[in-house]
Image (cartoon, grey):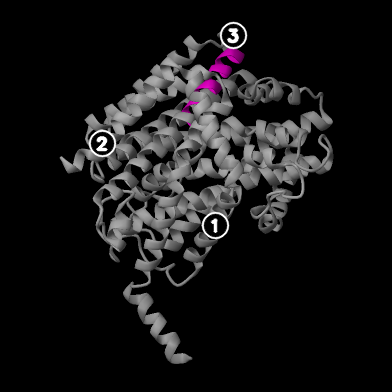
């Protein structure tokens, strides 16, 4: 019975929240907004330093004394090819989010940048820096560290793939309920984060159907999209990791790169590539400054909490989900290979993505016919499809984008269901289909409750609600990792040699 305690308690709590969201969506929305708003205003310094700490730790693990350690036995080798591995971690990590915010976020910051006048060349440049800060190294470092902890203990130390396993392995667990609570909080963080992200994806699909096929944007249409998505990802989940998620992820990356190249080649190519190169220089040169910036001398706390901190805590919310999933597919890689693949490569791709989509939108606003800003302010979910109207074959691109968004949603839901099933079946690397069905249906119900609010802001609040308590568990996990990895035989030998040399 003990093995099912986390499952039963998590199912009960998620069922209550799901029913609450469907029966009284406004009340649930106000509760989520109130909790997250309080945390963002009072603990802004804590979350900023915590998330920046993940980036520092990631760099240390990649280039420090532990870089050569393999996530598994020394004889283990990667299960998946590098291309499939990158496709799966990218699709699970933020594929749908890049489509939703690729046009909208740079435009928002161009119109209302913090501390300077909007709609200027300086505002455009700052817009790209801020966007890349939100979607770049910090985000992927959070994912990488969350995944590294689980992968190291699961495959190197043979512990179950559970949130509590690093804590149990290093500190013991005199109070079992404390460890079960850690696992339950991890499950809630995954479910809330996934529900918020799926809500935004469904709203974008609904907006795309309206733009391409003139289908009205109603709650009924949203629920139909959600039901179809649920059926599809449950079918995919039943086929297993090697077939369903891997195949869908490979399809995702092919379509995504095809649309990206079309935007670059058919759009203002020179302008996009200049933004890409400039963004790399601006982002890395401003990284230290932006990583510790809270605007204490200006009344910009609302902007910081509404953008930077919301994103950072959002990535924390997805940490247990993406972390466990990436850990599951990363067995056999060295820590250096793992960190570079999870942090650096997706960050460069994201910078190029925003240069193409956000840069094209800014070009239209600054040098073209304009109108993109008004469309983004009117309905953020329509921004991507509004951009496509400026390109040849816009209807074909829009249909491809709809397919891509839908597959990304299926992949994210499939991955999330897989991970939650692992977390609630004592870390089983191949959880049963029954667990996946239960969690798939529950996640869809909570998503439906969030959809009824019709608000992207509420979706964001739901996505980050579970991360606030989970951040404390992450700190314990990291301490457990650093204490344990120091006892690796090769690392102990290196330490002794350095002492002898001194």
Whichever of labels 2 and 1 marks the residue nearer the N terminus, that label is 2
Q: Is residue 442 magenta?
A: no
Q: Label 1, on which residue?
A: 55
Whichever of labels 3 and 1 marks the residue nearer the N terminus, that label is 1
**Residue 135: image location, x then y, percent:** 59, 44
Of residue 300 and residue 259, the one placed in the foreground of this image is: 300
Which of discs 2 and 1 lies nearer the camera? The answer is: 2
**Residue 472: image location, x then y, percent:** 44, 51
Separation (CA) of disc 3 from disc 1: 44 Å
Q: Secondary structure at mark 1?
A: helix
Q: Label 3, on which residue?
A: 214
Segment colored magenta: 197-212
Numbered badge on residue 477: none
Q: Looking at the image, which residue is at 57% across and 18% down?
A: 208
Q: Secondary structure at mark 2?
A: helix
Which of discs 3 and 1 lies nearer the camera? The answer is: 1
Judged by its main secondary structure, the magenta piece is: helix
Numbered badge on residue 7: 2
Q: Up-down: is 94 above or below 71?
A: above
Of residue 190 and residue 500, the one placed in the foreground of this image is: 190
Separation (CA) of disc 2 from disc 1: 32 Å
**Residue 169: image location, x then y, percent:** 28, 60
Q: Looking at the image, which residue is at 36% across and 81% down?
A: 493
On screen, residue 420 versus residue 216, left or right, reads: left
Q: Looking at the image, which residue is at 57% across and 22% down?
A: 455
On screen, residue 472 versus residue 75, left or right, reads: right
Q: Can the viewer see residue 220? A: yes
């Amino acid at each position: 019975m003990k093995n099912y305690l986390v499952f039963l308690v998590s199912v009960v709590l998620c069922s209550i929240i799901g029913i609450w969201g469907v029966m009284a969506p406004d009340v649930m929305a106000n509760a989520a907004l109130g909790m997250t708003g309080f945390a963002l205003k009072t603990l802004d310094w804590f979350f900023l330093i915590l998330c920046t700490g993940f980036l520092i730790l990631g760099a240390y693990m990649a280039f420090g004394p532990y870089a050569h350690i393999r996530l598994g036995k020394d004889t283990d080798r990667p299960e998946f090819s590098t291309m499939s591995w990158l496709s799966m971690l990218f699709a699970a990590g933020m594929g749908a989010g890049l489509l939703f915010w690729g046009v909208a976020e740079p435009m928002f910051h161009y119109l209302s940048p913090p501390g300077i006048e909007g709609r200027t060349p300086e505002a455009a440049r700052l817009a790209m820096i801020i966007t890349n800060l939100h979607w770049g190294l910090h985000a992927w470092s959070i994912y990488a560290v969350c995944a590294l902890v689980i992968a190291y203990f699961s495959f190197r130390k043979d512990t179950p793939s559970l949130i509590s396993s690093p804590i149990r392995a290093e500190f013991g667990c005199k109070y079992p309920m404390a460890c079960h609570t850690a696992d339950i909080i991890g499950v809630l963080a995954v479910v809330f984060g996934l529900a918020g992200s799926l809500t935004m994806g469904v709203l974008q699909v609904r907006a795309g159907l309206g733009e391409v096929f003139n289908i009205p944007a109603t709650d009924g249409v949203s629920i139909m999209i959600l039901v179809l998505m649920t059926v599809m990802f449950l079918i995919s989940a039943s086929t297993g990791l090697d077939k369903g998620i891997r195949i869908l992820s490979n399809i995702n990356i092919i379509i995504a790169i095809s649309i990206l190249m079309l935007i670059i080649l058919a759009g203002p190519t020179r302008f996009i590539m200049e933004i890409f190169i400039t963004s790399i220089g601006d982002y890395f040169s401003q990284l230290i400054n932006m990583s510790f910036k809270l605007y204490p001398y200006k009344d910009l706390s609302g902007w910081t909490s509404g953008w930077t901190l919301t994103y950072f805590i959002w990535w924390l919310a997805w940490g247990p989900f993406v972390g466990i999933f990436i850990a599951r597919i990363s067995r056999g890689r060295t820590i250096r290979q793992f960190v570079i693949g999870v942090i650096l490569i997706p960050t460069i791709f994201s910078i190029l993505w925003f240069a193409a989509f956000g840069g094209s939108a800014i070009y239209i606003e600054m040098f073209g016919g304009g109108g993109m800003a008004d469309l983004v302010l009117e309905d953020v979910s329509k921004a991507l499809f509004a951009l496509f109207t400026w390109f040849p074959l816009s209807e074909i691109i829009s249909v491809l984008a709809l397919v891509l968004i839908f597959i990304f949603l299926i992949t994210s839901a499939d991955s999330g269901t897989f991970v939650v099933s692992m977390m609630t079946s004592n870390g089983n690397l191949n959880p049963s289909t029954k667990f996946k069905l239960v969690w798939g249906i529950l996640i869809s119900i909570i998503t439906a409750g969030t959809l009824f609010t019709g608000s992207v802001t509420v979706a964001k609040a739901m996505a980050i609600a579970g991360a606030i308590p989970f951040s404390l568990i992450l700190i314990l996990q990291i301490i457990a990792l650093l204490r344990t990895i120091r006892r690796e035989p090769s690392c102990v030998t290196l330490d002794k040699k350095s002492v002898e040399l001194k």
